[in-house]
């Protein structure tokens, strides 16, 4: 294994010491070399995480939006690491998050990790914003490939809460879904393939749970040139582990959803 990555929407994460201990425990169980937390709503979270993970360096997006993206990486694992905010991913909307791009160099090769939290909603503006953010992902891959030497050279991994929940008919009187969530996810996979990427397979069908049920909102995509650990014995076994509330049931699951997050985390290993 070259390195491992975890992405997790931690849901309105403020500087609560008790909650942070639980979050840190969940992360440590998977021991990722790189991890990303979405929906960070307090700058103090970075300081607390630096204490919990003393062997990691951290970067936090910073802008007018309420929710930020925190990225941490194991200091001794990489020869070099460069973090940048990609403001084009807010698609001109100050309430949306920028992309968080971490580029790491290991044994002479650069790997680029883009963490995204796209617009949430089934209304037309949110659906359109997601589509534009995905288009900017393919544009970023093309630019990285060109700068690094050609097709596939970017070794790009994209992870995060992509909010693939479909599109409702834009007139309030019509409540049926015009584009359902599976159709949006399938279209995302097709667009990724056209850009030289693949939508990675997860070991669970859903990543979010709320009062309305369960949904598949969180995803990982990667350049086709990259390979990942398969969590299973077959050639098409999943490349992404979904951990958290899907592993639990009853009162334990209810506590996780209430105390931690309504999203599960995603974990993968680059080999």
Image: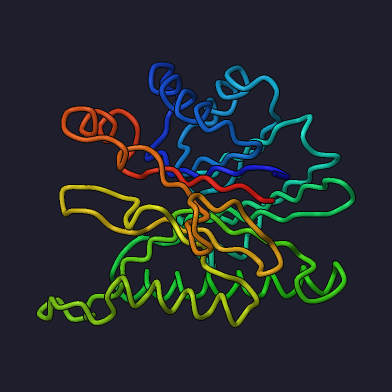
**Rendered position, 102 above or below 139:** above
Q: Position of residue 19 (x, y in %)?
A: 39, 23
Q: Position of residue 166 (x, y in %)?
A: 31, 72
- Is residue 173 toward the left or the right of residue 112 in the image? left
Q: Nearer the viewer, residue 25 or 233?
A: 233
Quick one: quadrant of the N terminus?
top right
Task: Write the residue at 28% across / 80% down.
Answer: 179
Task: Write the residue at 23% across / 75% down.
Answer: 168
Q: Nearer the viewer, residue 3 or 67?
A: 3
**Rendered position, 214 above or below 264:** below
Q: Nearer the viewer, residue 113 or 30?
A: 30
Q: Position of residue 2 (x, y in %)?
A: 73, 45
| Residue that protrudes farthest toward the front in the picture | 233
Would you identify the image quadrant in which residue 122 lies? bottom left
Task: Write the residue at 16% across / 54% down.
Answer: 212
**Rendered position, 179 above or below 7:** below
Would you identify the image quadrant in which residue 141 lies? bottom right
- Is residue 58 toward the left or the right of residue 98 in the image? right
Task: Write the residue at 56% across / 75% down.
Answer: 192
Q: Position of residue 97 (x, y in %)?
A: 52, 54
């Amino acid at each position: 294994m070259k390195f491992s990555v975890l992405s997790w929407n931690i849901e309105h994460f403020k500087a609560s010491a008790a909650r942070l201990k639980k979050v840190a425990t969940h992360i440590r169980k998977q021991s990722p070399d790189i991890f990303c937390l979405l929906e960070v709503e307090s700058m103090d979270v970075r300081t607390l995480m630096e204490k919990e993970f003393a062997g990691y360096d951290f970067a936090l997006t910073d802008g007018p939006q309420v929710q930020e993206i925190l990225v941490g990486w194991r200091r001794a694992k990489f020869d070099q690491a460069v973090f940048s905010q990609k403001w084009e991913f807010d698609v001109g909307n100050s309430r949306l998050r920028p992309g968080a791009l971490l580029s790491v160099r290991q044994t002479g090769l650069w790997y680029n990790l883009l963490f995204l939290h796209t617009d949430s909603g089934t209304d037309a503006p949110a659906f359109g914003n997601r589509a534009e953010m995905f288009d900017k992902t393919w544009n970023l891959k093309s630019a990285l490939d060109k700068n690094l030497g050609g097709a596939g050279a970017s070794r790009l991994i994209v992870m995060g809460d992509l909010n693939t929940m479909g599109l409702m008919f834009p007139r309030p009187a019509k409540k049926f879904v015009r584009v359902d969530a599976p159709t949006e996810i399938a279209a995302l996979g097709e667009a990724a393939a056209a850009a030289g990427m693949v939508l990675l397979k997860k070991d669970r069908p859903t990543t979010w749970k709320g009062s309305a049920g369960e949904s598949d909102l969180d995803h990982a995509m990667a350049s086709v040139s990259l390979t990942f650990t398969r969590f299973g014995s077959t050639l098409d076994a999943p490349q992404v582990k979904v951990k958290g509330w899907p592993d639990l049931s009853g009162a334990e699951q209810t506590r996780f959803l209430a105390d931690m997050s309504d999203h599960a985390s995603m974990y993968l290993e680059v080999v």
